[in-house]
Image: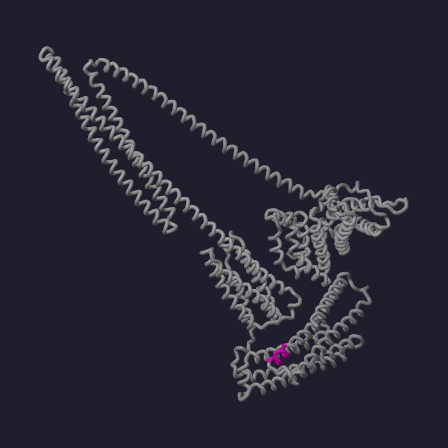
């Protein structure tokens, strides 16, 4: 804020922490550029204080960010250097100090902005070349000079009593001296080290200039430290070091023996207890938070480990139970095996005859099981091939040609798999049928053997020979049958192996083909992805380049708002309205282009075109808005200028959002549209009100306004004569002489304006007669309505200016007004007559004699206006010299008031000379 209070430490600390968080001062400067620094010297003083803190304690990138705004800081210093304001003088010195500080540290990057550099760093910076040491010493001297000049100016403006240093107004001025004291202590240390280095290499005569300059700086610094040490304000915040005495020796020249041991190291000269306590508190809080986080993390790990131990114990118990069950089952199986062995041992010799057949049946069953497993594997491989085929179809869907190949491959694979499956099913069915047939025959033979055994037991003695022969024949027949079945099974097994081998080869071939196709597809997909990513990056890079150019255009337009050379530029409300309407149209296109770019980021063409058009139109609107404000009333001018600045701020914010991919989505030009609509509305309000008049009445209105202007001028001359007569009656001496001189100059100005109005009227008649042809005068005025409206507006402005000047002159004579108001009125009349001349000569012939007469009258008006300013200033100075001869009866407050008024008058005089 602009109140006369010191900067709060917590606010500065928050800004410094912000620079470390974002690793720079971009945000700080983005807000600082929006502050009205040119209108408030106290606000500028506080800004310089905060900037000094940021440079000393901020992030190391702060210096580079501040150097980008070096010119802005210089402009602020130049502005306040011309204004006779106490804070303005301090701001000018402070900006010069900050610029010197930034330039020094940019040149010597090894020395940090807080100047906390060791002697080794200083030695490395100075180098071994004595010329570099000499130049570095000069730069340190200049650095120290700017610091001491600011400190001396602040202390000179303040009373060094305790009461002043404890007031907020005094603390507001004294607060930046804390950083000055810190800088000066380090600079003093650097100077001593460098002087010792120079004395070791150069003779004393060569360094006499350095010695004298150091002597002056030493005494100034010591005086500054002594004054600051006596102030209560500094005793609570900083420990001010004591400087050593300067002694001379008589060994052939004056040698300075500087005992900086009493001064102490540059890093330990200060005890900023509040900052240290706050820093320790923050560190303690961070350590506590870190400890709590570590404890929570350890507890979480302990809980996880306990849960893992419990789960492992449960798994161990389960495995133990499974092991116990397995042991029981093994024991049962062993018992069953023993029982089976006992039962098998009971078979007689007849049963051993069929063991071979049973073994062959078991072998046949095993082969059947193997064939069944192979069939299951084929089914599984078929399902796997189907899944791989489906995955391949999904991956190859990008291109139609690859998809067709995959479809053909899929159909072939499906056909082959179906054919193999059918063949395998047929073979398996046949084998199954054969196995069932063999099993039935085996069962029949076993049953027959059982019957034979029973028959043998019942009738052992009957037909033994015949039965044995039959049994032997049946045995041979069964053996032949088993051999035939084994041969068939062997052939079937070979056929199955051949089929399995062919299936394996086909599957491997299909796998290779699928792998090759998949590799090609992945290569193509990766290539397309790279191309797409490259396209996106190129489009975004084009967008960034366009955004940067747009920012430069907008910033250039904003710079013209504060450019003194732009003050003379004017524009019409009609042109401003047309520019604002075009800008609104470009904002719609910009919003549409932004939406299209978000939908398809491969093409930023629409957004780039809209962005280029918007930047130019927005800058044109801002510049013409400021130019229109120069001719507008005060309220409208302030609103229009403020809206132009807001339009620039919102535009730059929108462009900033377009710079990063994170904020690109939320970028919205809606706020810009609202501000441009406000500018459009103000432009419409500033249009001449004669637009509402019918065009057939414009001709009569021109004559009426010119006649009214002439009448106003005549009335002004009459009133000035009356004021002259009244002044001669009421005043005498110096005041009468001053009043007569001012009123005579006002009368001469009115006569010159009357001649100008007459010359303008004659030129208008010539223009109308030469350009209307067969049309009437009213028709000519109606056909050229814009030109006519300009004449009407200019004539009204001249008449109004004459009336206001008379009122101001009357107040000056009666000592109820200020001389500055009369000076301002003379400038306004000069501007109004210039507008009338411009409006009159738009359609005039360049070789017209009446045009030259009008131009001579215009120059005469400017001379008379300058005479009014000069006579007013001269009279004011004479009266002030007379009034200031005796100061015995004036109080301190009245003296300060008179001093401020004199400074204000000097400022207005400079402004007047600049306008003329």
Q: Residue 758: tell me if it is visible.
A: no
- Quadrant location of the C terminus in the rendered image: bottom right
- Quadrant location of the N terminus in the rendered image: bottom right
- Based on the picture, tell me whether residue 155 belongs to the magenta stretch: no
Q: How many marks?
A: 0
Q: Is residue 445 placed above or below 631 in the rendered structure?
A: above
Q: Which residues are magenta?
A: 835-842
Q: Residue 514: tell me if it is visible.
A: yes
Of residue 195 and residue 450, the one placed in the foreground of this image is: 450
Residue 714 quadrant: bottom right
Q: Position of residue 427 (x, y in %)?
A: 23, 34
Q: Is residue 287 left or right of residue 75?
A: left
Of residue 773 and residue 80, the one placed in the foreground of this image is: 773
Residue at the far top in the pictured view: 461
- Based on the picture, tell me whether residue 839 belongs to the magenta stretch: yes
Q: Is residue 390 placed above or below 330 in the rendered structure?
A: below
Of residue 121 and residue 520, the one placed in the foreground of this image is: 520
Q: Position of residue 204 (x, y in %)?
A: 86, 48
């Amino acid at each position: 804020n602009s109140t006369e209070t010191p900067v709060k430490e917590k606010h500065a600390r928050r800004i410094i922490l912000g620079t470390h968080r974002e690793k720079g001062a971009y945000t700080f400067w983005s807000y600082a550029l929006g502050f009205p620094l040119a209108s408030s010297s106290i606000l500028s003083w506080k800004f310089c204080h905060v900037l000094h803190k940021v440079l000393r304690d901020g992030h190391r990138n702060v210096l580079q960010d501040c150097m980008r705004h070096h010119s802005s800081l210089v402009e602020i210093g130049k502005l306040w250097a011309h204004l006779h304001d106490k804070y303005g003088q301090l701001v000018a010195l402070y900006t010069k100090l900050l610029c010197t500080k930034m330039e020094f540290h940019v040149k010597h990057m090894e020395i940090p902005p807080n100047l906390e550099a060791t002697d080794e760093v200083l030695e490395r910076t100075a180098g071994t070349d004595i010329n570099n040491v000499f130049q570095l010493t000069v730069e340190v001297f200049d650095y120290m000079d700017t610091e001491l000049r600011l400190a001396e100016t602040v202390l000179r403006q303040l009373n060094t009593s305790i009461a002043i240093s404890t007031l907020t107004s005094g603390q507001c001025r004294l607060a930046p001296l804390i950083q000055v004291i810190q800088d000066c202590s380090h600079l003093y240390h650097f100077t001593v080290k460098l002087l010792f280095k120079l004395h070791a290499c150069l003779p004393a005569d060569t360094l006499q200039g350095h010695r004298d300059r150091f002597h002056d700086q030493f005494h100034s610094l010591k005086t500054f430290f002594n004054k600051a040490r006596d102030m209560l304000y500094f005793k609570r915040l900083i420990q001010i070091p004591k400087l050593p005495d300067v002694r001379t020796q008589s060994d052939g020249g004056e040698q300075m023996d500087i005992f900086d041991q009493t001064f102490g190291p540059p890093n330990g000269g200060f005890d900023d207890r509040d900052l240290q306590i706050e820093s320790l508190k923050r560190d303690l809080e961070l350590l506590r938070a870190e400890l709590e986080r570590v404890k929570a993390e350890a507890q979480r790990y302990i809980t996880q480990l306990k849960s893992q131990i419990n789960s492992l114990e449960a798994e161990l118990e389960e495995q133990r139970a499974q092991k116990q069950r397995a042991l029981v089952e093994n024991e049962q199986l062993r018992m069953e095996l023993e029982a089976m062995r006992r039962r098998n041992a009971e078979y007689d010799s007849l049963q051993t005859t069929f063991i071979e057949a049973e073994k062959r049946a078991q072998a046949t069953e095993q082969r059947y099981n193997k064939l069944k497993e192979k069939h299951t594997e084929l089914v599984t491989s078929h399902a796997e091939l189907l899944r791989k085929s489906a995955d391949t179809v999904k991956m190859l869907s990008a291109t139609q040609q690859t998809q067709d190949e995959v479809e053909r491959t899929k159909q072939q694979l499906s056909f082959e798999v179906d054919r193999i499956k059918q063949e395998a099913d047929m073979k398996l069915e046949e084998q199954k049928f054969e196995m069932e047939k063999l099993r039935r025959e085996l069962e029949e033979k076993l049953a027959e053997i059982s019957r034979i055994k029973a028959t043998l037991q019942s009738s052992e003695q009957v037909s033994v020979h015949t039965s044995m022969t039959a049994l032997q024949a049946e045995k041979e027949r069964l053996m032949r049958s088993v051999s035939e079945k084994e041969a068939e099974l062997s052939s079937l097994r070979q056929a199955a192996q051949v089929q399995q081998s062919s299936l394996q080869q086909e599957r491997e071939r299909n796998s290779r083909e699928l792998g090759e196709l998949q590799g090609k597809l992945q290569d193509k997909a990766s290539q397309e992805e790279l191309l797409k990513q490259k396209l996106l990056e190129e489009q975004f890079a084009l967008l960034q380049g366009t955004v940067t150019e747009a920012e430069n255009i907008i910033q250039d337009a904003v710079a013209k708002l504060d450019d003194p050379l732009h003050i003379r530029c004017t524009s019409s409300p009609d042109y401003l309205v047309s520019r604002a309407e075009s800008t609104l149209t470009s904002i719609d296109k910009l919003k549409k282009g932004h939406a299209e770019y978000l939908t398809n980021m491969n093409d930023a063409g629409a957004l780039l075109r809209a962005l280029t058009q918007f930047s130019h139109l927005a800058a044109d609107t801002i510049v013409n808005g400021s130019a229109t404000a120069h001719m507008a009333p005060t309220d409208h001018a302030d609103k229009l200028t403020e809206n132009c600045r807001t339009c620039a701020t919102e535009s730059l914010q929108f462009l900033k959002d377009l710079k990063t991919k994170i904020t690109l989505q939320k970028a919205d030009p809606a706020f810009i549209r609202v501000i441009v609509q406000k500018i459009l509305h103000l432009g419409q309000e500033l249009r001449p009100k004669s637009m509402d008049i019918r065009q057939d009445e414009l001709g009569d209105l021109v004559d009426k306004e010119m006649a009214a202007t002439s009448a106003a001028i005549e009335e002004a001359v009459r009133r000035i004569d009356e004021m002259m007569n009244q002044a001669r009656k009421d005043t005498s001496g110096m005041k009468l002489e001053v009043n007569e001189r001012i009123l005579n100059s006002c009368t001469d100005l009115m006569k010159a304006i009357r001649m100008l109005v007459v010359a303008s009227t004659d030129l208008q008649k010539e223009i109308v007669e030469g350009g209307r042809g067969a049309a009437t005068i009213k028709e000519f005025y109606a056909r050229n309505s814009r030109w006519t409206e300009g004449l009407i507006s200019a004539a009204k402005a001249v008449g109004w200016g004459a009336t206001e000047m008379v009122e101001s002159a009357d107040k000056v004579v009666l000592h109820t007004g200020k001389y500055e108001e009369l000076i301002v009125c003379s400038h306004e009349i000069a501007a109004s007559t210039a507008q009338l001349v411009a409006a009159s000569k738009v359609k005039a012939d360049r070789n017209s004699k009446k045009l030259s007469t009008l131009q001579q009258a215009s120059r005469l008006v400017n001379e008379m206006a300058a005479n009014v300013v000069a006579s007013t200033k001269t009279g004011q100075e004479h009266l002030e010299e007379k009034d200031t001869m005796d100061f015995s009866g004036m109080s301190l407050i009245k003296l300060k008031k008179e001093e401020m008024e004199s400074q204000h008058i000097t400022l207005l005089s400079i402004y007047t000379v600049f306008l003329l």
